[in-house]
């Protein structure tokens, strides 16, 4: 599976951005799709994930501000980010993973995803 992300940029605090990610290749069997982010000097962390059945999970830090959506016909996953804060500044990566023996709650781990987009920079100025 190949993932192509787009939509990052520079925005002032309180502003909005929308990230999009298109999957191509052998997309059949993708279980989880999501967005992870990595700030300078920090580990990659999950922001929002969605299962093939539509179950969604958000990191506490983005809950109420970010909305993830998935379209399995178009093979896309998007992240609407509102009320952005300077601490949201990071490189954002879309990811796709297959079903494994792990339960859904484990899919916040980057290690369960085997396909990654190239990353898109989101910078929020104060």
Image: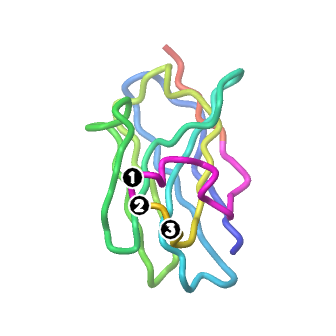
* The disc label shown at residue 103, or none: 2
Q: Position of residue 79 (x, y in %)?
A: 44, 52
- Tell me: residue 30, above or below residue 124: below
Identify the residue at image location x=51%, y=30%.
11
Q: Residue extending furthest top?
A: 126
Residue occupied by mark 1? 105
Q: Residues within 10 Å of mark 3 (few under 14, many from 20)?
A: few
Residue 62 in magenta?
Answer: no
- Callout 1: helix, strand or loop? helix
Q: In the rendered image, which quarter contains the N terminus?
A: bottom right
Q: Residue extending furthest left?
A: 64
Q: Single out the mark in the foreground, 3 or 1.
A: 3
Residue 105 in magenta?
Answer: yes
Alpha-carbon distance for marks 2 and 3? 7 Å
Asked whether disc 2 touches disc 1, contact meaning CB atoms under 8 Å apart, the reply is yes
Identify the residue at image location x=59%, y=69%.
22
Q: Nearer the viewer, residue 126 or 57?
A: 57
* The disc label shown at residue 101, or none: 3
Q: Position of residue 43 (x, y in %)?
A: 65, 30
Q: Which residues are magenta?
A: 103-120
- Tell me: residue 93, above or below residue 16: below
Q: Quadrant of residue 5?
A: bottom right
């Amino acid at each position: 599976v190949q993932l192509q992300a787009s939509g990052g940029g520079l925005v002032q605090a309180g502003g909005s951005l929308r990230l999009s990610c298109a999957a191509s290749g052998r997309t059949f069997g993708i279980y989880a799709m999501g967005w992870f982010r990595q700030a300078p000097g920090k580990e990659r962390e999950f922001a929002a994930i969605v299962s093939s059945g539509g179950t969604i999970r958000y990191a506490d830090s983005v809950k109420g501000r970010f909305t993830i959506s998935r379209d399995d016909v178009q093979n896309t996953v998007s992240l609407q980010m509102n009320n952005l804060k300077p601490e949201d500044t990071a490189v954002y990566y879309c990811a796709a993973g297959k079903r494994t023996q792990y339960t859904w709650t484990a899919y916040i781990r980057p290690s369960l995803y085997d396909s990654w987009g190239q990353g898109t920079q989101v910078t929020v100025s104060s």
